[in-house]
Amino acid sequence: MKNTWHLYSETVFSCNQWLPEDVTGFVITACNPRGELLLAPTNLLRNNVLLNELEFAGYRFRAMTGWAPDFSHGEAGWFVFADLAAGKALAQQFEQNAIYWVEQGTLNLYPVLLTEHTMTTLGRFRSRVRCV
């Protein structure tokens, strides 16, 4: 059985607007805090609260969904054009185990609550994104 970190490392993404090849920012969701699966209406509410936080702070962002490679599980979220410190703070606020940090187009899995892990480089972000 694959552990949580390994599952996170396999994530692929969908969006409705291409991002620049050399983009920098982070992918975050408010769904399923601490990895606990919540009902869809609860996750929707949590993501709307996160959306309000992003808007209030004045961040630029785009809708983005993270998926299992076979699309059997997905979590709606946001690509945020901001620095890693902002991503980490929001992830802590919304009780997320990790975020995806993208630096100059390179995708990294960055631990937040899963402190036993270190940042893991996953390759080119663009190779994992499907624009629909």
Image (spheres, grey):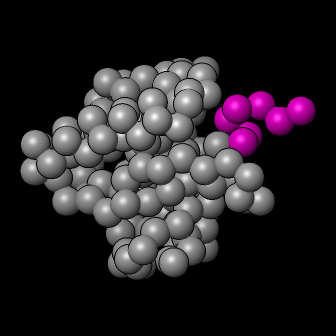
Q: Specify start and end residues of the magenta stretch as a single range.
A: 1-7
Does residue 54 appear in this view? yes
Q: Residue at x 46, y 35 (%)?
A: 41
x%, y% of residue 34? 54, 22
x%, y% of residue 99? 46, 41
Viewer-side residue, 13 vs 105: 13
Q: Is residue 44 left or right of residue 3?
A: left
Q: Is residue 116 left or right of residue 28?
A: right
Q: Is 19 part of what is drawn in magenta?
A: no
Residue farthest to the front?
41
> Is residue 106 placed above or below 88 in the rendered structure?
below
Q: Residue at x 32, y 24 (%)?
A: 93
**Where, quadrant-wise, is the N terminus in this rendering?**
top right
Viewer-side residue, 88 vs 90: 90
Q: Residue at x 45, y 30 (%)?
A: 42
x%, y% of residue 19? 37, 75
Q: Quadrant of residue 129?
A: bottom right
Q: Residue at x 55, y 54 (%)?
A: 66
> Is residue 43 placed above or below 100 in the rendered structure?
above
Residue farthest to the right?
1
x%, y% of residue 55? 15, 48
Viewer-side residue, 15 vs 82: 15
